[in-house]
Amino acid sequence: MIDRTTMRLIWVGLGAATALGASVAVAQPSYPTRTITVIVPMSPGGPPDVISRLVVPQLTGPLGVPIVVENKPGAGGAIGAAQVARSSPDGYVLLAATNNALSVIPATRKDAGYTLKDFAAIGGFAIDPGVFVTRPGGPWKDLDGFVDYARKNPGKLSYGSAGVGTTTHLAMEALKQAHGLEIVHVPFKGTQPAKAAVLGGHISVAVGPVSVMMPQIRSGELLPLVTTSRTRVRDLPTVPTVSEKGAPQASFNLWVGLYAPADTPKAVINKLKATLANILSDPKVAESVESLGMVLDLTEPEQAINRLEAEYEVVVELAKKLPLAQ
């Protein structure tokens, strides 16, 4: 049997060990303690890059560490996204990306190198709706006129997108299917070249984010026909949405959000989520986002993932019809 003296020593030892463990736990530094790198998997100057550089650096103050925004373009966003997917799940390498990188690419490319399951959502922060534009003075004044002309002239019209498999490409293809149209697709390496082509009269219509097309819409150089937004765009109140025009399946928008590698600790995700939410609650930030032609979109992590999963399924089915799957 253990005598009282031995038992007393055991309890003293256990108490000391517990106290030591508690002190070690308190002494452990809390996240974050060093620089956080946020990968933007697109080229500098595009809508995802601009909005990310507006929102993400503001995490620096509340988190107390430097935030470095780094562009890793290539393969429509797949290169940068794959890099983050392979990173250590510790919260020090994050991804600021659109749904094009996280739902469209995995749905259309077998060689993407990642899936949506490789990421944990922190939250969405902006939506950039798409808009179909044409030069004014043509044979159509609105979407109805465009659809009627296209039906009567199959194969004679052309449209430009940011490339095969992008949201701009999918939006027009879905609209074509909804109305039974034959319009030639001219893919470009980005929205800016597509916009230049429609301004120059080389293509009939271009599809791109509102933020990119808005300056020429405001100047009268481009005529907006329809948007892909769920509701009417604030700065384009007279322009209908694809849902209003009988093609809700064409509602492909750019959603920009912040993501971490899968298995990142929940405490880290929650801290980043709360910090992002506080930043987006600032009216000045909201005004800055909307001044770019975008819509502020504070999306909960679960909602962001559910939305990406739903779009993934839509794209998979659309890709079979086009076809896009590789």
Image: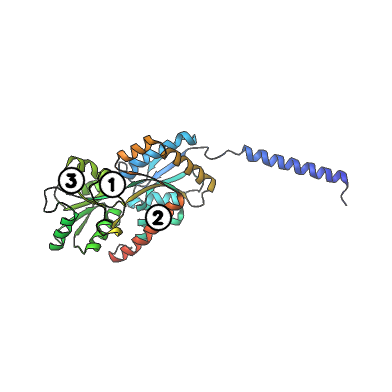
Image point 34% across, 37% down: which residue? Answer: 287
Q: Residues within 10 Å of mark 3 (few under 14, many from 20)?
A: many
* Earlier-in-chain disc, 1 versus 3: 3
* Distance (Cα) linking label 1 and label 3: 16 Å
Q: Check residue 233 in the rendering and tell me which mark sits there, or answer none.
A: 1
For residue 77, the mark is: none
Label 1: how many residues lie within 10 Å, few (<14), some (14-19) or many (20+)? Answer: many
Q: Which residue is mark 3?
A: 222
Q: Tell me the colour scheme of the image.
A: rainbow
Q: Secondary structure at mark 3?
A: loop
CB-based contact (under 8 Å), mark 1 and mark 2:
no
Q: Is residue 111 visible?
A: no
Disc 2 residue type (three-letter): Arg
Task: Choose between 139 and 313: the one closer to the eye.
Answer: 139
Residue type marked 1? Val
Res 21 quadrant in image:
top right
**Which-is-in-front pick, marks 1 and 3?**
1
* Three-letter amino acid code of the residue under disc 3: Leu
Question: Where 51 falls versus 182 (above or below)?
Answer: above
Residue corresponding to mark 2: 307
**Of the pair 266 and 84, the residue shown nearer to us:** 266
Q: Is 288 placed above or below 118 here?
A: above
Relative side of 118 to 8, left or right: left
Q: What is the x, y in percent for residue 139?
A: 11, 53
